[in-house]
Image (spheres, rainbow, N blue to C red):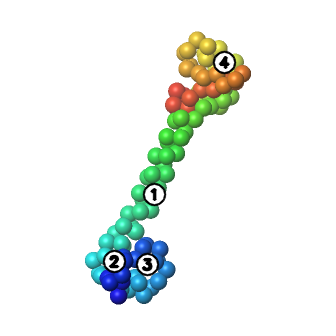
Amino acid sequence: MWQSSPVPTLDEIAASAGVAAALPLPIIAALDTVLAILPAAHLEHEASKENEASEDSLLEVAEVASVLGLARSYVYELAPTNQLPAVRVGRYIRIKACEVR
């Protein structure tokens, strides 16, 4: 049926049981395999994106103090000496998350 016309898209296959039924068995088996793999691959991709974002993020002094178990005033003392690499954003001090973890 669909072999004489363009190959159906995945949306067309999902929307119509008739289109899906007309697919050859090897294609249906391949689609089943892909559908089994996709959720795990998607979760891995989302986790890697989250890690990249969290490593690039800037933390406030209070967050850094909490993570390291230090007083905020001590974190402020460490920043200008480069013992704790920091970035000044306007009048605020921020520390890269990757420097803390």
Amino acid type of the residue that numbered disc 1 sits on in the rendered structure: His
Q: Quadrant of residue 60?
A: top right
Residue that numbered label 2 is attached to: 28
Crowdedness near tag 4: few (<14), some (14–19) or many (≥20) residues, C-alpha within 10 Å: some
**Circle 1 or circle 3, nearest the eye:** 3
* Marks 3/2: CA–CA distance: 10 Å
Q: Which comes before the other along the chain, label 4 or label 1?
A: 1
Residue 36: image x %, image y %? 39, 67
Q: Nearer the viewer, mark 4 or mark 3?
A: 3
Residues tagged 3 and 2 counted as in contact (Cβ below 8 A): no
Mark closer to the chain start, 4 or 3: 3
Q: Amino acid at mark 4?
A: Tyr
Q: Are marks 1 and 3 in contact (CB under 8 Å)?
A: no
Give the labeled residue for mark 1.
42
Question: Spatial distance from mark 4 to mark 1, Cα to Cα?
Answer: 40 Å
Depth check: 97 or 3 in front? Answer: 3
Q: What residue sits right under mark 3 in the picture?
A: 13
Around disc 2, counting alpha carbons within 10 Å, would you say few (fewer than 14), some (14 to 19), or many (20 or more)? some
Which numbered dot is residue 76? 4
Distance, label 2 to label 4, CA atoms, is 61 Å
Residue 33 percent coordinates (x, y): 34, 69
Give the mark toward the camera: 4 or 1: 1
**How many marks do you count on the picture?**
4
**92 above or below 52?**
above
The furthest residue to the top: 81
Q: What is the CA distance from the residue labelled 4 to the residue labelled 3?
A: 59 Å
Figure check: 65 above or below 3: above
